[in-house]
Image: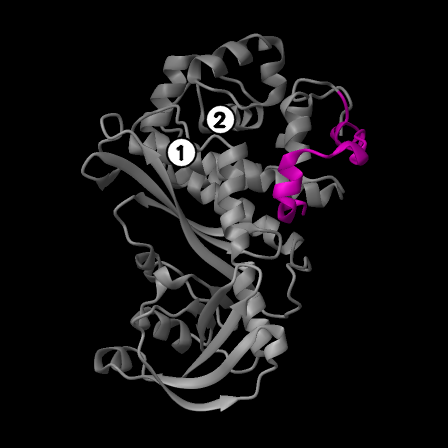
């Protein structure tokens, strides 16, 4: 890379420009646009994510203070608060949703051999949602409760590398289980979900697609035991049974046999009951798989702490979704850079270094390598070490 290029310029070299143009053309994003293109908008909003800008005015002042460097950073349009507000409100958010998917498809193969704590050949996904609270008077379209607005991020996380492969942004009233209708089930994959996704019609669809699920039973789930397997109770297992549903409606929705595993979590002093259609893996492996579901919770916590997805630069649905999708794209882009540059430092550390070095004219590998990892003792790394990928 050109040593005289800014760090931000070197970052955007990792973007597949041709694929971005295809996403723009698909939704006519640059139709009759002369001054501030979709690429300008994407780079400006990515800059805001990387440098933790608080508002549109903050973005405008910061970038215009380095006006002589903007063209070489790829931002060719004039930066103004009103222009950025208008484009966020009116330019189709699906451009950036599609481009995020392009980056996800690049990132996933890079992390294909990553370990997530359980040695399996299957692709393992964790499915969950996170609610972002909003002000009802400012975001009236984000329906949730009578006096409260919110949106939900429904996310399917590939546990190898913690890459979000599917994200659906809905208002807060949409129940979690509905997102199962939007998933394209991959045969042979394992889907880990909490009991909020216990819907036997949808679970049967996963089973018929030759995929596996691991979830938890509810207290009122009525099952009849057919036979039991021997378990080693010293491992925390209490039983491993083959069961069928006894309620007529549930049995019609899921007519096949299920596997019920009881496990005692000594750390939290809690008994957990798992339901799965996988009769091949050991009972203890199933219990460990469900424990890995916590990684999606950490993913939500991490992006809320380190990306701008809780406070928004615009109030319309289009502006909110645009900001979230560009934030996800920025997250995945940094994940790609980390792997392609073979960086050994944590994801958090990379973002912190980039946030204060984007205007520097140094090789990006040198900037990201000149860090003493022994000094990485922040609370962020201690709490979120799952993201040291």
Q: Main secondary structure of the magenta part?
A: helix
- Residue located farthest toward the left when viewing the structure as drawn: 146
Q: Residues within 10 Å of mark 1 (few under 14, many from 20)?
A: many
Task: Please state which of residues 220 and 33 is positioned toward the viewer in this rendering.
Answer: 220
**Could you tell me residue 288's position as x and y percent?**
58, 67
Residue lying at 57% horizontally and 42% vertically, measured from the top left? 332
Residue lying at 54% horizontally and 48% vertically, measured from the top left? 104
Can you say whether 213 is above or below 11 in the image?
below
**Could you tell me residue 304's position as x and y percent?**
48, 36
Q: Quadrant of residue 86?
A: top left
Residue lying at 69% horizontally and 27% vertically, measured from the top left? 353
Q: Is residue 17 magenta?
A: no
Q: Earlier in the sequence, mark 1 or mark 2?
A: 2
Q: Quadrant of residue 344?
A: top right
Instruction: Tell me how the rendering is colored.
Output: one colour
Task: Please state which of residues 89 and 272 is positioned toward the viewer in this rendering.
Answer: 272
Residue placed under numbered mark 2 in the picture: 45
Task: Please state which of residues 323 and 137 is positioned toward the viewer in this rendering.
Answer: 137
Residue lying at 59% horizontally and 49% vertically, measured from the top left? 106
Can you say whether 297 is above or below 195 in the image?
above
- For the residues bearing labels 1 and 2, Cβ distance under 8 angstroms: yes
Residue placed under numbered mark 1 in the picture: 322
| SS label for mark 1 | helix
**Could you tell me residue 387's position as x and y percent?**
63, 46
Q: Residues within 10 Å of mark 2 (few under 14, many from 20)?
A: many
Q: Is residue 257 visible?
A: no
**Could you tell me residue 148's position as x and y percent?**
25, 35
Segment tinted magenta in the rendering: 362-389
């Amino acid at each position: 890379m050109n040593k005289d290029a800014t760090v931000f310029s070197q970052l955007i070299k990792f973007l597949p420009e041709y694929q971005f143009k295809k996403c723009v053309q698909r939704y006519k994003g640059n139709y009759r646009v002369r001054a501030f293109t979709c690429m300008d908008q994407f780079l400006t909003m990515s800059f805001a994510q990387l440098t933790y800008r608080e508002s549109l005015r903050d973005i405008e002042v910061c970038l215009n203070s380095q006006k002589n460097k903007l063209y070489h950073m790829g931002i060719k349009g004039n930066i103004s608060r009103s222009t950025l507000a208008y484009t966020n409100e009116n330019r189709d958010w699906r451009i950036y949703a599609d481009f995020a998917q392009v980056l996800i498809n690049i990132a996933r193969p890079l992390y294909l051999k990553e370990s997530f704590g359980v040695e399996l050949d299957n692709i393992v996904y964790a499915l969950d949602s996170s609610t972002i609270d909003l002000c009802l008077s400012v975001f009236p379209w984000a329906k949730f409760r009578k006096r409260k607005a919110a949106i939900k991020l429904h996310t399917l996380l590939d546990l190898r590398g913690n890459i979000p492969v599917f994200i659906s942004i809905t208002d807060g009233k949409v129940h979690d289980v509905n997102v199962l209708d939007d998933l394209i089930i991959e045969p042979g994959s394992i889907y880990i979900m909490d009991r909020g996704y216990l819907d036997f019609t949808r679970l049967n669809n996963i089973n018929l697609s030759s995929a596996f699920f691991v979830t938890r039973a509810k207290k009122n789930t009525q099952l009849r035991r057919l036979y039991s397997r021997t378990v080693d109770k010293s491992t925390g297992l209490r039983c491993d049974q083959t069961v069928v549903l006894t309620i007529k409606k549930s049995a019609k929705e899921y007519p096949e046999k299920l596997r019920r595993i009881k496990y005692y979590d000594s750390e939290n002093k809690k008994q957990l009951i798992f339901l799965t259609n996988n009769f091949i893996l050991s009972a203890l492996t199933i219990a460990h798989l469900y424990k890995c579901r916590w990684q999606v919770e950490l993913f939500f916590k991490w992006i809320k702490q380190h990306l701008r997805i809780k406070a928004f630069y615009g109030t319309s649905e289009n502006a909110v979704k645009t900001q979230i999708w560009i934030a996800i794209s920025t997250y995945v882009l940094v994940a790609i850079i980390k792997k392609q540059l073979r960086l050994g430092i944590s994801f958090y550390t990379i973002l912190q270094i980039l946030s204060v070095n984007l205007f520097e004219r140094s090789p990006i590998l040198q900037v990201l390598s000149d860090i003493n990892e022994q000094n990485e003792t922040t609370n962020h790394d201690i709490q979120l070490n799952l993201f040291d990928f």
